[in-house]
Image (cartoon, rainbow, N blue to C red):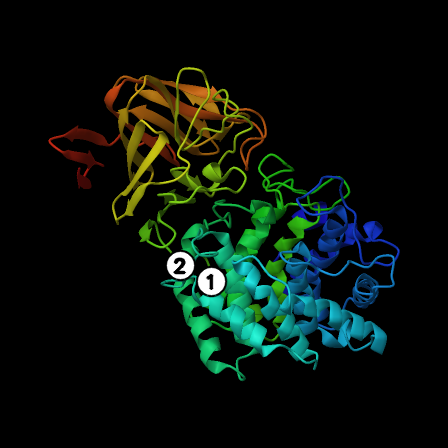
Amino acid sequence: MKMLTDNPLRTREDLKKAVLDITAPLLPHYSEGKSRLHIGDTSASYSDSTAEAEAFARPLWGLAPLLSDGCADDWAELYRKGLASGTDPDSPEYWGDPHDYDQLLVEMAAMGLALMLAPEKIWEPLGEKEKANIYRWLSFVNEKKAYDCNWRLFAVMVNLGFRKAGLPYCAEAVDAALARVEEFYLGDGWYADGKPAHSDYYVAFAIHFYQLVYAKQMETADPERSALYKARAKAFAEDFILWFGEDGEAVPYGRSMTYRFAQAAFWSAYAYAGVDGFAPGVVKGIILRCLRSWFKRPIWNNDGTLSIGYGYPNLIMTEGYNAPGSPYWALKTMLVLALGEDSEFWRCEELPLPVADGSRALAHPHMIAQKNGRHSVLFAAGHPMPNWHTHGEAKYEKFAYSNLFGFSVPKSRWGTGAAGLDSTLALSEGDEDWRTKRENKEFLVTDDYIYAKWTPWADVEVKTYLIPRLPWQVRVHIISSGRELASFEGGFAYPSEGASALPRGDGAFVAFGGFTGGIIDLLGGREAGLRGMEANTNLVFSRTAVPALTGPVHRGETVLGCAVFCGEGEASPAPALTVEGGKITVDFGGKKVVIEL
């Protein structure tokens, strides 16, 4: 939308305008009673009725902070009417009594935030019957079962809203939820989103987000937990800042990428809670640059509503719980509007990222995070779990995830173009039915390298060693196979438009937007080339090509080794690799990494 592209996003007024510009296109789509919002005809795993209730609730993540400033009376009136009709059992627009594991429990969290931040707008003008219905309906969150993950914290958000509105709240439900999430804690500020589960953006825009809201709201009533959650957020931020590039682009990784600029929601909660860590100007810069980067992208439908997708409208990469209103979770990043104009956050100057080029092993999410200029990459070991989420192997098990080049998901396992084979090794029995790493049998993350063992067939074992040193990364695969196989190994995916192939005899290379990318076979036996990918498989670019290596894998033991490059300007000299004498040795031209096998 032009009004967002033109918004400089420098001041609090700019951000308020952005919320109004994002939500204004929704107005024609509300139901007569204002409790439902129909903005698309695609489906999710829950009913269309619930999807319309979700679409009603999620704009509150941005509108509630806006309403806390005493403005947007028209929106306040609309949401009072919608809450009243959606929770009235006698209304034709009643959302229904929530059941165990109901998506409606998710949407209650945004309503709880509205009660917390703007009770004088959302709650106090209501009649007694309306208040009784809303309170009764939201109280289901204390009775119904929630999935054993960040869902546990929805009860916390609702009860904090009750408390702020002067209503009876269930301290037992809050304590039980916080105690269970405490069991998800891994250390160094990191959680898993369940037990066992991944450590992904849900740690940032869900678990930490809700706990930091608690820390702010309960600063006086529960100082011990408040201090604990702030301390953990401070520790987490030291790692999480590496997921963001200089220009604001965060690394797409894991599920729920259709929530887009919610990537920065943790930083908004960090500022809202007053965490004593990075300077307010640093946090402000991360948030505003992230929003600017997103508002330049074609992420809107023709009517101005947010689309389902990532860098462009795209249903292929989504999960079964992504309904037309789901992307408005992104508005969680607008929580900083709950900070007044006179707060230090809004008075300070925006500062650049304080993190220089470098590398850090992140033990808990099983990664090495590296930065090189504008490029931020998460080199991932993967997880010892089956990754049942849609495209789970693409979202969690690739070797590298880039803030600039995204990752690809498969349309099909058949054919290299449809299988989304960037940043991975794929194997087939020569029938174009490609298998990639789906889960680990073993893994190890060190400061210098990552190791993972995986078994695409019962009689095929792959030991992968990933040695990153941006702008290069070296991969070694020791394959023990009981069958004849074909292999395909891809580097980063580049856009087909604007990228040009570079003539180079030792590999396949392309140039794009000031970057050079490519792949080199370091041990021989494979052929290099550029392979076109199916349209809409990559999250960032709608049409892509991948520098790739192809070759056979014979029965017995095969060792494959390659170097992948992605950097600004021309490619530097390739690293040297030897695999002999029970050792892998990589020489990056002055920096040697030796791995004992």
Marking on residue 312: none
Q: Quadrant of the C terminus?
A: top left
Q: Above or below — where is 430 with respect to 468? A: above
Where is residue 58? Give x, y as percent: 69, 57
Numbered-mark total: 2
Name the residue located 56 percent from the left edge and 57 percent from the top edge: 147
Q: Quadrant of the N terminus?
A: top right
Q: Quadrant of residue 515?
A: top left
Front position in the image: 107 or 279: 107
Q: For the residue labelled by badge 1, is the local secondary structure a helix, a strand or a loop?
A: helix
Residue furthest out toward the left = 581
Front position in the image: 469 or 445: 445
Q: Callout 1, which amino acid?
A: Val
* Mark 2 crowdedness (10 Å alpha carbons): few <14, some 14-19, many ≥20: few
Q: Callout 2, which amino acid?
A: Pro
Q: Above or below — where is 259 with respect to 118? A: above
Where is residue 201? Give x, y as percent: 50, 53
Where is residue 478? Give x, y as percent: 25, 29
Residue marked by disc 1:
282
Q: For the residue labelled by badge 2, is the local secondary structure a helix, a strand or a loop?
A: loop
